[in-house]
C-alpha cells in the first residue's frame, strides 16, 4: 500500500481527505499533522511515500515544507 501523511490545519479537511484516501485499498493513511513542525517530526520517525500538504499552514507554507523535506 502507498503510505500517506495528510497535513492540514483544518480538522475537517484532515478527516475528509483521510476518509477519501482510505477508501482505496491500495492507500494507507499512516498519519496526520496540523502544521509543518508536526509534519517534520512525524517524517523523522515514520516512512511515507506521499505527503498530502495544505498550501496555507499556520507556521510555514506547504510549498516551503515540501522544499525542507
Image (tube, rainbow, N blue to C red):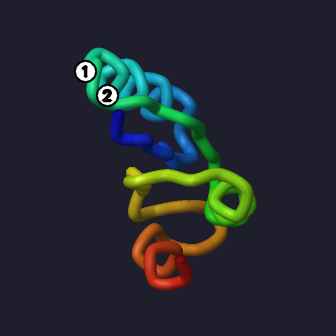
SS type, badge 2: helix
Nearer to us: label 1 or label 2: 1
Residue 3, x across and y down, in percent:
43, 41
SS type, badge 1: loop
**Residue 35 position (above or below residue 32):** below
The N terminus appears in which quarter of the rendering?
top left
Residue placed furthest toward the front? 1
Mark 1 and mark 2 residues within 8 Å of each other at the beta carbon:
yes
On screen, residue 62 versus residue 27, left or right, reads right
Residue 41, x across and y down, in percent:
74, 61
Name the mark on residue 68. none
Residue that appears at 42% across and 30% down? 28
Residue that appears at 29% across and 15% down? 23
Residue 34, x across and y down, in percent:
63, 47
Name the mark on residue 21. 2
Q: Quadrant of residue 21?
A: top left
Residue 48, x across and y down, in percent:
49, 52
**Residue 7 position (above or below residue 1):** below
Residue that appears at 65% across and 51% down? 46
Q: Residues within 10 Å of mark 1 (few under 14, many from 20)?
A: few
Residue carrying label 1: 24
**Residue 45 position (above or below residue 9):** below
**Residue 62 position (above or below residue 64):** above
Amino acid at each position: 500500500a502507498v503510505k500517506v501523511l495528510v497535513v492540514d490545519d483544518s480538522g475537517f479537511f484532515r478527516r475528509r481527505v483521510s476518509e477519501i484516501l482510505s477508501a482505496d485499498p491500495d492507500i494507507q493513511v499512516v498519519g496526520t499533522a496540523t502544521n509543518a513542525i508536526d509534519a517534520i517530526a512525524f517524517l523523522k520517525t515514520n516512512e511515507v511515500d506521499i505527503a498530502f500538504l495544505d498550501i496555507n499552514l499556520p507556521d510555514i507554507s506547504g510549498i516551503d515544507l515540501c522544499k525542507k523535506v
